Image (cartoon, rainbow, N blue to C red):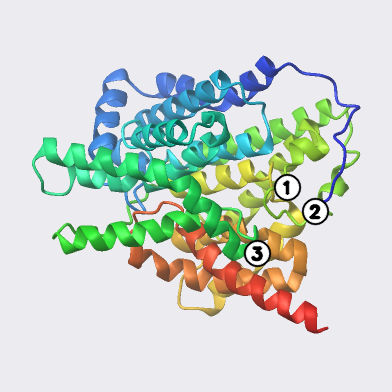
Amino acid sequence: MQNLSTNHTEPKIGRHTHFFILSVIPVTFIILALLLDTPKNIFSGLYKIILSPDNLLTDYLVVGGFGATLLNVSLISLINIFILYKLELKISGAVIAAVFTSMGFSFFGKTIFNIWPMYLGGLLYVKYNKISYKDIITTIMYSTCLAPVVSQLAFSSGLPAHIGIILGILFGIIIGFLITPLSFNMYKLHDGYNLYNVGFTAGVIGILANSLMKSFGINIEQQLILSNKYDMFFNIYLLIIFIVLIISGYILNSKSFKGYSKIMTFSGKLLTDYVDLMGHGLTLINMGIMGLICMFFIFLTSGVYNGPIIGGILTVVGFSAIGNHPGNSIPIMVGVFFGGILKIWNIQSTPAIIAGIFGTTLAPIAGKYGFYAGVFAGFLHLSVAMNVGIVHGGTNLYNNGFAGGLVASVLFTLFESFRKKS
């Protein structure tokens, strides 16, 4: 990874202030929920969200409604931020990516109930290995992509409630215990060219879990529950958030965009932490710009802002602190877009659109091997992402991370072999 020093012209901001800034979006969600919905609707909706099957694609804006969804997102985000704060982590690109990813997937798949068994499993792992929880906390946060299995076993397996809940919690604990060593080894297959490495790992685990449940007569059917009711609201809200990110970054970077072009020189391969390399100001600018690019992709494809699409955008914005930038991400989106036009899928459908957004997990391919390699990777990714969900039954929320891992593992090997021969 290229070694550049942090932007030292950036004004010093305390750790408390960094965590406060990270909390702004989830706090605004709570305020909006209370202003625009009633307490009765919020808490009855949250109850429905907790009990619902959460496998792909289950939009909580439909299941629980507006206020309940925003409360679910806020609680998960703020509790995670509090845990990170108590563990005394600094706000790095990895931390930002983990928080924004958890925030995004709390719109469709992660609930205030189904994620915590993984955290308990992680706690057992650090006790067993005599290491600090802060060393693995971001990996544990990502491991909650398998949270739908916890809910499925607990509430939708057909088992007696007490048995289902116990089995669901046990599954989550096992995942939290195993995810760190498994993801470390899965990384070696794609060498960091798939940003969503835990999603790749979880895809394999999801296949095993889905197969095991089916062998006992517990079948998980993929879902397509999507909202179109709040399209305009989230269009305006996200636009404001991304503009604020850019303005905030501009102010932090001594009221300048100076140095931003340097971000484009990085491949984005894991772990390329822009906070450490370029400073918070330029990182925030990059996050805001990538958010606007995602919004332009939604506009180009005539998409609707629903839970999965909002989650996808927030995830990319988070990973714009640790890998994504316009230079390595746009080629992937171009490849997915042309794939959507030429292939059998409707590019205006939510599954195809989120393949374009989440497909930027392959951004390091474009960053390392060039624009056309990125377009080819995106073109291939769409086909894989639209087909692999069936093997894990939608239990892995990071389906595109799984697909991206498969694509990156193949393309990385091929491109490197071509480079050696040339």
Crowding near the residue tagged with mark 1, few <14, some 14–19, many ≥20 C-alpha atoms within 10 Å: many
- Circle nearer the N terminus (3, 1): 1
**2 or 3: tag closer to the N-terminus:** 2
How many circles with numbers are drawn on the protein?
3
The reply, left or right, for residue 342 in relation to residue 368 is left
In the image, what residue type sits under mark 2?
A: Phe
Q: Secondary structure at mark 3?
A: helix
Is residue 324 shown above or below 79?
below
Name the residue that disc number 1 marks: 272
With 352 as the anchor, is 94 left or right in this view?
A: right
Q: Is residue 154 left or right of residue 239?
A: left
Lateral position of residue 249 relative to residue 107, left or right: right
Which residue is more in the foreground, 341 or 394?
394
Q: Residues within 10 Å of mark 3 (few under 14, many from 20)?
A: many
Image vertical order of residue 212 relative to residue 153, above or below? below
Q: Which mark is residue 332?
A: 3
Q: Residue at x 48, y 61 (%)?
A: 402
Residue 12 picture quarter? top right
Image point 14% across, 59% down: which residue? 216
Q: Could you tell me if the residues under marks 1 and 2 are in contact, i.e. CB atoms within 8 Å?
A: yes
Q: Nearer the viewer, residue 389 or 88?
A: 88
Amino acid type at circle 1 is: Thr
What secondary structure is marked by label 1?
loop
Measured as percent of width and height from the top left, residue 15 is found at 69, 18
Measured as percent of width and height from the top left, residue 146 is found at 37, 48
Q: The residue under label 3 is which amino acid type?
A: Ile
Label 2 to label 3, Cα distance in Å? Answer: 16 Å
Q: CA distance from mark 3 to mark 1?
A: 18 Å
Mark 2, residue position: 266
Q: x, y (%) of residue 330?
A: 70, 60
Depth check, mark 2 against mark 3: the one in front is 2
